[in-house]
Image (spheres, grey):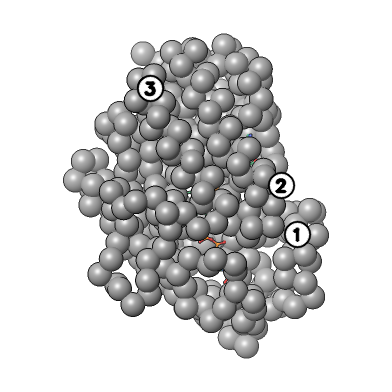
Amino acid sequence: MKKTWLVTGGAGFIGGNFIYHILSAHDDVDVVCVDSLTYAGNLSTLAGAMNDPRFAFVRADIRDCDAMRGVFAEHKPTAVVNFAAESHVDRSIKDPGIFISTNVTGTQVLMDCCLEFGTERFHQVSTDEVYGDLPLDRPDLFFTEDTPLDPSSPYSASKAAADLLALAYRRTYGLNVTISRCSNNYGPYQFPEKLIPLTIANALEGRRLPVYGKGENVRDWLYVEDHCRAIDAVIDRGKPGEVYNIGGHNEMRNIDIVKKICNLLGKPHDLIEFVADRKGHDLRYAIDPTKAKRELGWEPKTKFVDGIKSTVEWYLSHESWWREIISGEYKEYYRKMYGGKS
Ligand code: NAD
Ligand code: TDX
């Protein structure tokens, strides 16, 4: 039977990569992308899918019930994969309202449509940030699926709320929900407000490289294609109502990431500038992906040393993609966020 997957937020970083992954990995899946094209959404990210007869794009807001009902009625998706979200922690600290609205209400609207139109599966793309953080001096501790939710930022609180709502729809209405909670992603098409692409773009422009606090905070980095394969595996083999942690045991301090990028680009470390810390800055994220390996047979394939090299090369060979972005609304965001400092 023909499958149609509704992918929300597909003009963003991970959703865009996921759409390319699905179109090349599955002949029997049609993809409909819904994206409202916020500042973070770029149609140019999907240029390579636009002429594919198995792909359709609809510009619409996931919070808009009428628009979503129209999309479900027309395309009759067999599964929904919800990437659409406000995703940047710093923006959530400055302006939390839109995070609650998009990340929570948007998820509710999509799940209501799934119930109304009999959609077989709703997959919520979540984050390790819902667990809060881990101390820097306890390398033996990891987030498992049983770690209590303890989000720190308005962004992560909104994602935790959406996860709880999804689990409530499972219990109350029997909706076939799955959730994946992934660690930090990197790779092609990531918006240059996030640490890795921001560092690459700034270094190429000879700008300062802002590092929050002392740069000692630790993130657990996963190449985006590995995340896409994990979500695909959850949709294929995941059990209804279950949560799967996705990560590759690749913890690194922010300062080491920034230095590594300088080295790859042949730029001096003295471009680095330590700036004021993020409010409530999570110290360390570290995922235990044992369940995904055991139940789904999923494992990451890309080593950080290779992934970061190909990511830097991608930004070097796609300058027009990110230069167009940093010339628009981003300029004003950057000025407000970093002032004249970096
Ligand atoms: P992104 O900001 O690059 O993309 C988000 C996309 O959603 C954009 O295309 C945007 O236009 C769209 N969007 C936003 N609000 C919308 C709305 N109301 N209606 C329709 N579309 C809307 O985000 P990303 O980094 O690709 O993250 C995708 C998902 O993965 C998010 O749910 C995020 O929480 C989760 N996640 C991200 C990471 C990471 O490292 N980036 C890690 C784990 C989980
Ligand atoms: O200029 C910067 N300087 C800096 O030191 C920026 C933008 C970030 N940082 C630090 C803050 C974090 O410790 O780098 C680390 C990574 O920051 P981000 O790229 O903003 O990612 P993070 O806050 O860890 O969240 C990301 O991973 C989990 C995604 O943005 C989320 O959507 C995802 O859920």
Are circles 1 and 2 on residues that touch, CB within 8 Å?
yes
Q: Crowding near pointer 3: few (<14 within 10 Å), some, many (20+)? A: few
Question: In which quadrant of the rendered image does the N terminus lie?
Answer: top left
Q: Where is residue 291 in the image (x, y as percent from the top left)?
A: 23, 47
Is the CB–ligand 1 distance for label 2 below 8 Å? yes
Q: What residue type is labelled 1?
A: Tyr
**Residue 187 in view here:** yes
Find numbered disc 1 in the image and state the secondary structure of the residue it sits on. helix
**Label 1 to label 2: alpha-carbon separation:** 10 Å
Find numbered disc 3 in the image and state the secondary structure of the residue it sits on. helix
Residue 172: mark: 3
Are circles 1 and 3 on residues that touch, CB within 8 Å?
no
Indicate which disc, 1 or 2, sits on the residue closer to the N terminus: 2
Residue 333: mark: 1
Q: What residue type is labelled 3?
A: Thr
Q: In this view, does 79 lie above or below 21?
A: above
What residue appears at the point 48 percent right and 65 percent down from the top-left corner? 282
Location of mark 2 (residue): 39
Which quadrant of the structure image shows residue 200? Answer: bottom right
Question: In which quadrant of the rendered image does the C terminus lie?
Answer: bottom right
Is the CB–ligand 2 distance for label 1 below 8 Å? no
